[in-house]
Amino acid sequence: MRTFPTAFGLTPSQVRQVIRLAGMAPSLHNSQPWRFRITPHLIELHADPGRRLRAADPEDRELWLACGAALLNLRLALAHEGIRPVVSLLPPLGASTALAEVRSGGQGQPRPEEVRLHAAIPERHSHRQPFRDVPVATADRHLLARAAQEEGTWFHVVQPGQQGALEGLVHRANRVQMADNRFRAELAAWVGRGAGSTEGVPLAAAGPKPDPADQWVHRDFTAGQTERDPGTKFESHPLLVLLCTRTSDPAAELQAGQALQRLWLTATAQGLVASMISQVLEVRETREEVMDLLGGHATPQAMLRIGHGTTTAVAPRREPDDMVFDGVVEPHTGR
Ligand SMILES: Cc1cc2nc3c(=O)[nH]c(=O)nc-3n(C[C@H](O)[C@H](O)[C@H](O)COP(=O)(O)O)c2cc1C
């Protein structure tokens, strides 16, 4: 194994651990579309253009969300190592093509909230199985709302009167995607990989095969390889939230990614579990209808289902050595 690059006076093994934790962020189909350039005084976050998902995410919106989520983990991991991170999003100077630059703002103990969220990083997973029919407590909802706000975003709780319309849109979006050969081929490439794979969604984490009668249609990660247990019944009232930003641009998406991760880690730290239901925001027409549903003033970036659940299988990750590079960088992806 080559020596890992160092930054901010940390040891190579500390920096490797920082990158490992950054890489535990969620990403579309577990594509892990990030990479890091490490210099003694700077860690740059870059998109990995080879990991774009052109059928599901043609505008790279979700790629930027995933990179934002990795950035939040990076911030927490540095804070844990005693480095106060200072982040510039989309640094404008020079020829940099980084999505974000992280510098040291000096040394200091992590704050209690950072300690809690840092501990939740390896515990956070996508829970695609049915949840228990237990509501999310009001105090927890407030904590989640605050987490979103702390990263400059907010979420809209889907109200009972909106559920019917939204359910219909999710089903429609799913049908559009599954009728698209390119989308299906891309999805197939990321699911059901062998035991040694370090990316993609393993069958064990896939959740039940979706049924057209399900209230909320989940993405089908079963690759046609597992049958649904006939007794499967999803919870009747999940907490569904739409994470929103004011604008729709790469900076907003990086912001939303950090908020998504802070929200999800906060839920994890509170003993809650979550999964994402994204089809409706990936298909342009249904996404526009969701915007209308929200009154036209918000950009919905992510939809999460949050509740109480049991343990789930873990999706694998690449090694930190695979996520760092020191070469010349290509321009920003597609935007
Ligand atoms: C932008 C984005 C969209 C996602 N959309 C979905 C989705 O529609 N359905 C789903 O089950 N998981 C979705 N996920 C979750 C990823 O599949 C998951 O993060 C990845 O497989 C890694 O697994 P983990 O979350 O358990 O670490 C999404 C994640 C991100 C960041």
Image: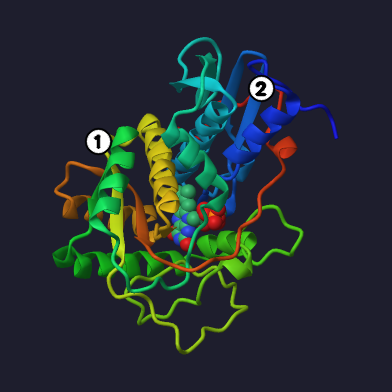
Residue 126, percent from left and from top: 50, 59
Q: Is mark 2 within 8 Å of ligand 1?
A: no
Residue 109, percent from left and from top: 51, 23
In the image, residue 125 sits, relative to residue 212, either above or below, namely above
Of the 4 image quadrants, the one containing the N terminus is: top right
Going by the picture, which residue comes out furthest to the bottom?
Answer: 230
Helix, strand or loop under label 1:
loop
Tell me where residue 170 sits by quadrant.
bottom left
Q: Nearer the viewer, residue 196 or 111?
A: 111
Residue beneath disc 2: 38
Q: Residues within 10 Å of mark 2 (few under 14, many from 20)?
A: many
Q: Nearer the viewer, residue 266 or 165?
A: 266
Q: Nearer the viewer, residue 36 or 179?
A: 36
- Residue under the image location 42 percent in, 73 percent down: 130
Residue 278, percent from left and from top: 40, 57
Helix, strand or loop under label 2:
strand
Q: CA distance from mark 1 to mark 2?
A: 32 Å
In the image, residue 40 sits, relative to residue 33, either above or below, namely above
- In this rendering, does residue 107 appear at all? yes
Q: Going by the image, does 13 lie left or right of 333?
A: right
Going by the picture, which residue comes out furthest to the right?
Answer: 1
- Residue under the image location 51 percent in, 86 percent down: 229
Q: Residues within 10 Å of mark 1 (few under 14, many from 20)?
A: few
Name the amino acid, label 2: Ile
Mark 1 or mark 2, earlier in chain = 2
Q: Going by the image, does 134 lie left or right of 187?
A: left
Per the rendering, the mark at residue 246 is 1
Name the amino acid, label 1: Arg
